[in-house]
């Protein structure tokens, strides 16, 4: 008897439980990694590189974040002023940690993202992507680069638009942290959903459409990745787990008919 398909069953219409289904995709992804030797080997390699990157990022923030904040706001002499200064330092450092963790490791591990997504789709069965051609390779690299630039632009633009909140006395920095975290979670969902969609040459507009139409489901995925980043040891596996989860979500959208067939794919290869 063949094992059940790992592809999640996505409701054609948004539901209140979508957020928790998106959150649960990380557990489904972790289980799939543990059952597949290839996924586990790739994930272990990712974990080693991610651990080095996260330690380096933490060291940089610890040593240079106070200097950066001090260059724009000198540390006050009063106790309450210092309290506010350190509060801003900690809150800004938390957001910068998450943002840096979602930029540095993916850049270092870019060559492994497609193999992870491909191995996941092989376990799902059905469409494994277009056949290799030089033109297809160049088109995929170009599409991937454009997607990456677009995603980074939206991340930075969103956080920049929220910066004026720091000007609100007392609660401004707290609001910036909360809203910045929500924006980063949404961006994470787009980042890891776009990984398989880029490989299948979908335009970035399709990624944005899914984020908009299935907001709760995608936010659940992003929230799960965000939480995983704060769990010591397990956070070194956040990238492979997130890529596998994003690929499963993509296949769930495809199975539910929420996405059109991949550009250039034949109907006979679709799930």
Image (cartoon, rainbow, N blue to C red):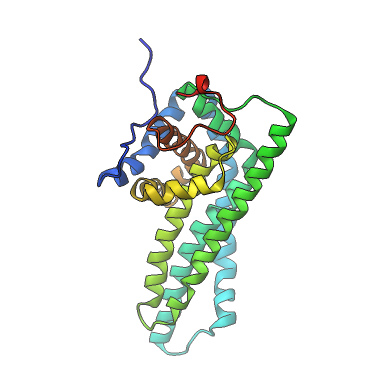
Relative to 201, residue 4 above or below:
above
View extreme (left): residue = 16
Q: Is residue 120 left or right of residue 176?
A: right
Identify the residue at the far top of this view: 1
Q: Quadrant of residue 142?
A: top right
Which residue is at a point 47% across and 23% down the rendered structure image?
123
User: Closer to the camera, 5 or 228?
Assistant: 5
Work out whether residue 9 or residue 226 is closer to the camera in this orientation and state it: 9
The N terminus lies in quadrant: top left
Residue 117: x and y in percent read 54, 33
Identified at 33% across, 31% down, the residue is 9
Q: Residue furthest bottom?
A: 78
Q: Nearer the viewer, residue 69 or 122?
A: 122
Instruction: Inspect this view and state whether residue 232 appears.
Output: no
Residue ID at (50%, 45%): 206
Q: Position of residue 187 (x, y in %)?
A: 48, 54
**Residue pictured at 45% horizontal, 50% vertical:** 229
Among the 4 quarters of the image, the one containing residue 156: bottom right
Q: Position of residue 244 (x, y in %)?
A: 48, 35
Position of residue 250 in the picture relative to residue 51 (left or right): left
Q: Which one is nearer the viewer's eye here, 120 or 91?
A: 120
Q: How many marks?
A: 0
Quadrant in which the C terminus is drawn: top left
Residue 39, image x, y percentages: 52, 28
**Can residue 161 be seen at all in this image of the molecule?**
yes
Q: Is residue 33 above or below residue 168?
A: above
């Amino acid at each position: 008897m063949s094992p059940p398909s790992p592809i999640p069953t996505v409701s054609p219409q948004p539901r209140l439980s979508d957020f928790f289904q998106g959150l649960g995709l990380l557990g489904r992804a972790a289980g799939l990694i543990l059952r597949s030797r290839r996924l586990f080997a790739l994930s272990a390699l990712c974990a080693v590189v991610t651990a080095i990157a996260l330690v380096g990022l933490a060291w940089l923030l610890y040593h240079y974040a106070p200097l950066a904040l001090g260059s724009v706001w000198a540390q006050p002499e009063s106790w309450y002023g210092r309290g506010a200064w350190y509060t801003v330092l900690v809150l800004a450092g938390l957001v910068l940690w998450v943002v840096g963790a979602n930029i540095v490791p993916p850049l270092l591990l870019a060559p492994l993202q497609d193999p992870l997504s491909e191995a996941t789709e092989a376990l799902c069965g059905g469409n494994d992507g277009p056949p290799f051609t030089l033109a297809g390779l160049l088109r995929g690299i170009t599409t991937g680069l454009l997607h990456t630039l677009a995603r980074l632009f939206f991340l930075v633009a969103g956080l920049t638009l929220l910066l004026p909140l720091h000007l609100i006395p007392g609660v401004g920095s707290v609001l910036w942290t909360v809203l910045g975290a929500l924006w980063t979670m949404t961006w994470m969902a787009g980042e890891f959903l776009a990984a398989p969609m880029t490989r299948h040459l979908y335009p970035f507009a399709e990624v944005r459409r899914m984020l908009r139409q299935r907001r709760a489901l995608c936010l659940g995925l992003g929230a799960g990745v965000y939480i995983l980043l704060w769990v010591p040891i397990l956070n070194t596996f956040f990238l492979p787990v997130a890529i596998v989860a994003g690929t499963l979500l993509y296949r769930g959208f495809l199975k539910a008919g929420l996405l059109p067939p991949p550009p250039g794919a034949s109907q006979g290869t679709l799930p």
